[in-house]
Each structure stands twice: as structure tokens, then as C-alpha cells.
Image: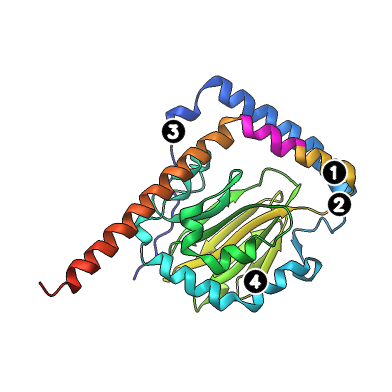
Amino acid sequence: MTVAPNETKAARPDRLKHPLRKRVKRLGKKFTRRIARHQAKVSLVPNTPFLDPGLFPHLKEFEDRWEEIAAETREVLKHRDSIPAFQEISPDQYRIATEKNWRTFILFGFGERLETNCSQMPVTTEILERVPNLRIAWLSILAPGYHIPAHTGVTKGLIRNHLGLIIPQEREKCRIRVDDQIRPWSEGKFLVLDDTYEHEVWNETNEERVVLLFDFDRPMKWSGRVLNRFFLWAIKFSAFYRDPLRNSRNAEKRFENAIRQADATLENMSDPS
């Protein structure tokens, strides 16, 4: 299989060109940069690009049971064609996600648990529910040969976690850069990072890469926690929250229908009449 790079610049969807939306986005970036400086000062964990997973004891259960999580993931991937692309869920990500190269199977996000999706991964869901202040959780499914361009996250108030589940054999060719540090994924191990640093991803192999990605609140002193809660509350009134919420619900329904159709097909095939 020949791996082709993805260097074509994606066009901005028309609905993202509205002047008000652009103004809100610009003001939001200014606000998050300002509060990020304060959150860095009051953080109870390092402000480094990568963090030691040992700082967060609740991550150990994931590594202890990663094979169970990977088994559930493989069952979900049997319906891969019904898993939405990232930009189908979050249109603002059109620049870093194109076609079906980066798919997302959302379990928790945008303020709620997606019940149908969670029912497909009960062990994973059970462990995630024990994570303090969990905000989002989803399977990040990266196609062979895809490069996610450099970008930055929204808020320093969250810690991002990647648990390696399905990693290409040539794992050194499947890696993430955060600031000036580059690391590959390993199956059953975490990469914990601050995604407000510029970061980008390469999968320069012929194999798919799948990680369980989830965010939880950064441990901070009380003033940082207050700012974080206010920011996460305020963003719920914006299109940057409402659009992904609506799209994730629609995607969940489509996935549920795909499973029902697959089950019906198997039942018909097994019917001796």
C-alpha cells in the first residue's frame, strides 16, 4: 500500500464565515490566552508539554485493563464506516481533519454521556466514570499515512490523555509532537500532555492508529478552578459547543442504525428458512 501525504489545504465551510462567529472566536482566543497565564501560575502539576502519568493515580486502572478496552474498541471498529470524521462532529476543525482520515467515536463530550455509544464499550465507560472531573472521552482513529497539521488546544484548564490501543508495528513512524518534544505511542501506555502547546501528529505507516483520548480538569488552586468552571460554562452558549453537541447526537443515531442493520443481516443469514 502506498502512503500519500495530505498537504491539500481544506476550504473553510461557508457556515464558519459569518462575521459574528469569527468575532466570537477571536475574542474567545484572547480571553483563553489571558486566563491561561493565570492557570499556569496556580497549576498544581507541571506546565510542561508532556506530563508524567504517575501524577494522576486514576490512570493506572486504564493501563491495567487496556486489553479489555482494546477488545471493545475492535468491536466498535467493525462498524468503522459508520463512525464520523472529526470535522463532521466539530466543523471548526476543517483545517486539521479532511475526508475520513480522522474518525471519532464519542463516549462523553459536550456536556453529556452518549448512552448508545457507551453501551458499546461498557468496561471503558465504567472506568471513565471514575475519572475526576471528566470532560470529554472518545476513540481517536487515525488513518494510515495521515498527518494532522500543527494546532493548539482551547484551554489550559484541561489535561489531555492518550491511551494507546491499536498502534502500528513501526511505532516510531506514528508519533506526536508537542512543542519541541516528539514521542510515539505504545499499546497500553499513556501519553499525557498539555495541548495548549502547539502539537501535530504523523502516522507514516500503512496501519491504523487508535487511542482512547480524554480530558479532565487540571489540578489547580481555587482561583484557577473557578476560572476553568466559568470558561466551560460560558462556552456552552456558543456555536462551538452547540454544533458539536447536535452533530454528535446525530452521529450516535446513525451508528446505532448501522448496528441494527448489521444484526438484522446476520439474523437473516442464519435463518435456515
Distance from label 2 to label 3 (Cα)? 37 Å
* Residue contact at pointers 2 and 1, CB within 8 angstroms: yes
**Side (left or right) of 178 relative to 262:** right
* Residue contact at pointers 1 and 4, CB within 8 angstroms: no
Residue on which the image places disc 1: 224
Name the element at disc 1: helix
Distance from label 3 to label 4 (Cα)? 37 Å
Q: Residue at x 49, y 29 (%)?
A: 16
State the extent of the magenta-drawn residues as a range.
230-237
The relative height of residue 5 versus residue 268 in the rendered view (above or below) is: above
**Which circle, 3 or 1, is nearer the viewer?**
1
Q: Residue 51 at x, y = what percent? A: 77, 64
Q: Residue at x 54, y 34 (%)?
A: 242
Q: Residue at x 57, y 20 (%)?
A: 20
| Mark 2, other Cα within 10 Å: few <14 / some 14–19 / many ≥20 | some
**Which circle, 3 or 4, is nearer the viewer?**
4
| Mark 3, other Cα within 10 Å: few <14 / some 14–19 / many ≥20 | few
Q: Which image quarter holds the N terminus?
A: bottom left
Distance from label 1 to label 4 (Cα)? 27 Å
Residue on which the image places disc 2: 43
